[in-house]
Image (tube, rainbow, N blue to C red):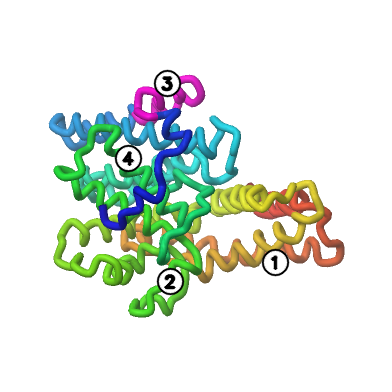
Amino acid sequence: MIFGYASLYPPDDVERALPDAATARTLLQDRRPDILAFVDRRRQRLFAHFGAETAGLLDRTADAFVLGTARLGLRHGNFGNDLHAYHNEAHILELAQRRFNAYENQLGLAALPLADWVVLALFAACHDLRQREALDVPGPVDGNEAASMAEALRILDACGFDRQRERPLYVALELAIAGSTFGLNARPLENSAEAAIGGGALARYLPGLLDQTVPDWRGDAVVEHALILARIAADLDTANAGESFAELADSAIRLCREREMRERRALDSAESAQPCLDFLTRGQEKFFFELHHFCSREGERVFGPGKVANASHVRAVSAALREHFATTPPATGAAVIEAYRVLAGC
């Protein structure tokens, strides 16, 4: 659609193993039937609010959500043999259940049209589909996000969406996943006034990226609305900064475990000790105080007060963890994680 990454990231073994919603439902029925029950409850809630004429769209959305969730669970989750402690099917539910609930409690379902809720649901299911891509694309979009975008559009195709008739959905999902690229590399745009702020989610810098890659995008109402949704999606993805501190700390532990796994450092080894200590102190402070910024008014309204409340806890637990190992360095990464868990109360 916008970026044209599909040819760079063709289907893999997981896509071929789960080609459609029917095969995905079979897997989830066997492994996580509660996810199917959640999808049905969510569909019924949206149906009741938005009306009977939405039935077809809701059915296709449910199929795409199920397919994305099952594929991530098989590729990097608890259904396969490459378990990632953070980027797995549970992270999808963090967004689609807990964080959607927070949005709805604060803003209400009427705050967004159904089409926007659909985009955000599909973003939750599809934004982390790929986590081991060796191929990067030119520019700031990470290879994992680029590959996830390519697969997400194929998921829409497989579930009965139409690229021409439903172009706004395709464009919005593509830009939302691109905007979820996070870190220092998400500020590459010299012509962006926001780039001086530094890092964080690429969603804030997407207009500058589009100026460089799709110069005729301005004035396209579909793209302009998609950029708004990309900002909301980015805040959903990083809302751990504004959730309860126990939830923030739990996400830090899972990310730490995944990082060590990706670096092939065993948590019960000495070589993981210092990297874990750095990640759970300096790394958390950097994420919270330097990299994380709210991208949307909605995200700041819902999660901003929680982030303010968490600031003192992030500082205190980081300081306490450093003090805990000040005289006797940790023996292993597992020892660091356990000490952090106790200090954080999670």
What is the crowding at mark 1: few (fewer than 14 residues within 10 Å), some, or many (at least 20)? Answer: few
Is the residue 305 above or below the residue 54 in the image? below
* Label 4: which secondary element: helix
The residue that label 1 is drawn on is 319
Left or right side of 107 for 335: right
The residue that label 2 is drawn on is 187
Q: Nearer the viewer, mark 2 or mark 4?
A: 4
Q: CA distance from mark 1 to mark 3?
A: 48 Å
Tag 1 or tag 2, which sits nearer the N-term?
A: 2
The residue that label 3 is drawn on is 26
Q: Closest to the observer: 290 or 272? A: 272
How many marks on residues?
4
Is residue 11 in view? yes
Q: Closest to the observer: 116 or 171? A: 171
Q: Kindly identify the amino acid type of the residue bearing the numbered disc 1.
A: Ala
The residue that label 4 is drawn on is 154
Q: Kindly identify the amino acid type of the residue bearing the numbered disc 4.
A: Arg
- The structure residue drawn at horizontal position 79% and vertical position 52%, both measured from the top left corner, is 332
What is the crowding at mark 2: few (fewer than 14 residues within 10 Å), some, or many (at least 20)? Answer: many
Q: CA distance from mark 3 to mark 4?
A: 20 Å
Tag 4 or tag 2, which sits nearer the N-term?
A: 4
Is the residue 15 above or below the residue 112 in the image? above
SS assignment for the magenta stretch, majority: helix
